[in-house]
Image (cartoon, rainbow, N blue to C red):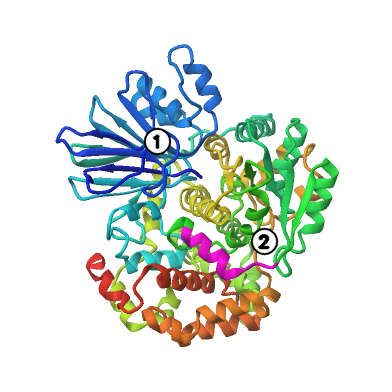
Amino acid sequence: MRSLLALIGWPEIGLPPGTWFGSDPRGRDVALLHGTAAEAGPPVAVNEQRTVYAVLAGSVHNARELRATLGGRHTFASKDDAEVVVHLYEERGIQAVSSVRGAFALALWDTRRRQLLLARDQLGLGELYYATDGSRLVAASTLPGLAVVPGLTAAWDMTALDAFLTFGAVPPPATLHPGVRQLRPGELAVWEEGRVRTQRYWQLVFPARRVTHADLATLVRDQVTEALRLRQAGLVSGVLLSSGVHAATLLSLAVREGRPPARAYTVGAPGIGDDELRHAARLATRVGVEHVPLTEPPDWPALVDDMLTVHGSPLAALDAPILGIATARAVSEVDALLAGIGGREVFGGARPARELEALQRYRKLPSLAREAVQMWARIAPAARAAALRRLIEGERVAPVTMYARSVSLLQPEQRGQIYTPDTLAVLGESSPWSALTETFADAVSAGAEDPADAFHYVELTLGLPARAAAARAALGAVELRLPLADHRLAHLVASVTAGQRTTSTRGQLLLRNALTDVVPSGVLGGRALSPVPRRVAWRSGPLRAFVEDVIAPARLSVHGIFDADAVARLWREHLAGDRDHAGCLWAIVLATRWLERWARPQAAAFRRSESASA
């Protein structure tokens, strides 16, 4: 994914040729470039009057349609998607971004108004970070890109790291660095006269009257087909193929529409997705697309470090590093990889939504049946009854608490055990779940009266951007395109009732109903799987060696954040199969690896974060 960098008031920073320079009303230097401070990309896009300049990271998927619309009134000097936005801005102002479909981050300078526009795509598939001290500003589409400003990313915040260890990513607008913010999905920022103001230009809404059209399946299929067409246009594409419905949808529709991907790639290393190879190969053969099995064992340290290098902060998605196995093969064979990531969040069926639907069914049981269920949950082994116990506990808590317990890698009761006393003292009364409370409030303002709608909103707002960022960081040099993560599709799905999206046993009902004559029935009825390490991979081989090396007491004690004995206890329980601590352990591994690369091992973490936590 191409990067961008924008600077205001940093004349001392040397930038490569190809950088556009201007000035603001106070004479401060303004600089825009595609790329980073070390390596510039294509020239900066500009309008005919040379009054509007822009750089864009990512892709505008409807660029062809926008060019056709604008072509009669504007002259295009390049194929750069940023130039499309420049001309669109001339006609519509800052609301021009509302018409752009894609995964992007944008920086645009208007010389007449002397203002900088920053924008992130509607679903947050791209990222945009910025920092300002009131007189200067720097913005970049990657955290490593901000390293152009000395010391900006040197400090880090323990409360943000706590949020990462809870959710697997830091919810915006926060980042791991106290001086750096990130735009929310569908948000723009305008910098003018030394001030930054932000506003939402797009937000998912739940209408008061829900869609009940008999042709709803046709509407869904048509929109999915259009979203896929836009993301395949002009590219030699491949597809990341698993046995789940999302990847199969993309492959089957692309073939039906006469635009089959060149190859289908499936990760199937021993103990990791190996049960998907046979199903994926059968589907690829059925539709006549070459299938490429990727069976080499993961080099865990290299895959994790590559992700950290690309993203600049840890992302705890368990399946993400494994996708990096596809990079070496795909980068030389296709222009972009299509993936079904986003289908679960857009069409419903994520774990919190399924647990909520199961809870609603449980509440309808006769009292005697509920008592029997509660009795069995008390006497059954912990591993077998974990989901049932969460269900029973969910009856006594508020929806936001239920959701938090469902998605959290580190549960509230574990924080006092996993962290050292010094870490807990720094965290004080701060709570990572406050971000969820705010997002649930946003969901209510967007029309989510049903808790299931609120869950759906949070999955799209917090879950999808983190999952997309992890996959993009893992693939690195390969452009990733996600047809099912389309904001117009999201609006369509939000226009139906929660019961039409998911049940406790089946998700993506709209998608499945729309594709009955396109995707093989065995795939539609199956369960979507991720290439995550199975139990056998944790118990022996390279993954076990990697984890045990990173969580060794001597390494954990360097930073003084985690209690080594508590982490060792989690590891023993996970290996024995008593409890599934995969998500929590993986977050600890990623956090420790990140601290070793970006934090000074000799300095105590607490001293660096005290000022941010005060």
Q: Residue furthest left?
A: 26
Expressed as whole percent of the image width and height from the top left, the position of residue 301 reads 56, 70
- Above or below, 273 relative to 262: below
Q: Where is mark 1, residue-wise?
A: 55
Residue 591's disc number: none
Locate residue 316 relative to residue 106 in the image: left or right.
Answer: right
Q: Main secondary structure of the magenta part?
A: helix
Residue at image point 73% right, 36% down = 253
Instruction: Name the residue rendered at 48%, 25% in the picture.
Output: 78
The answer, for residue 173, to whether it is visible in the render is no
Q: Calculate the distance from the C-alpha at mark 2 to the C-alpha at mark 1.
A: 35 Å
Which residues lie in the magenta part? 297-309
- Above or below, 278 relative to 427: above
Mark 1 residue crowding within 10 angstroms, few (<14) / some (14–19) / many (20+): many
Mark found first going from the N terminus, 2 or 1: 1
Q: Position of residue 312 (x, y in %)?
A: 43, 59
Q: Quadrant of residue 157?
A: bottom left
Report helix, strand or loop for mark 2.
loop
Which residue of the protein is positioned furthest toward the front in this rendering?
A: 17
What amino acid is labelled 1 in the image? Val
Residue 307 sits inside the magenta stretch:
yes
- The answer to whether residue 284 is seen in the rendering is yes
Query: As shown in the figure, which amino acid type bears the numbered disc 2?
Result: Pro
Residue 268: x %, y % from top left = 73, 62
Provide the residue designation for mark 2: 531
Query: Which callout, 2 or 1, points to the residue nearer the camera?
Result: 1
Q: Is residue 36 above or below residue 268?
A: above
Q: Secondary structure at mark 1?
A: strand
Q: Nearer the viewer, residue 576 or 193?
A: 193
- Label pair 2/1, CB-CB below 8 angstroms: no
Left or right? Give the position of 519 relative to 478: right
Query: Residue 444 location, x and y as percent?
Result: 41, 46
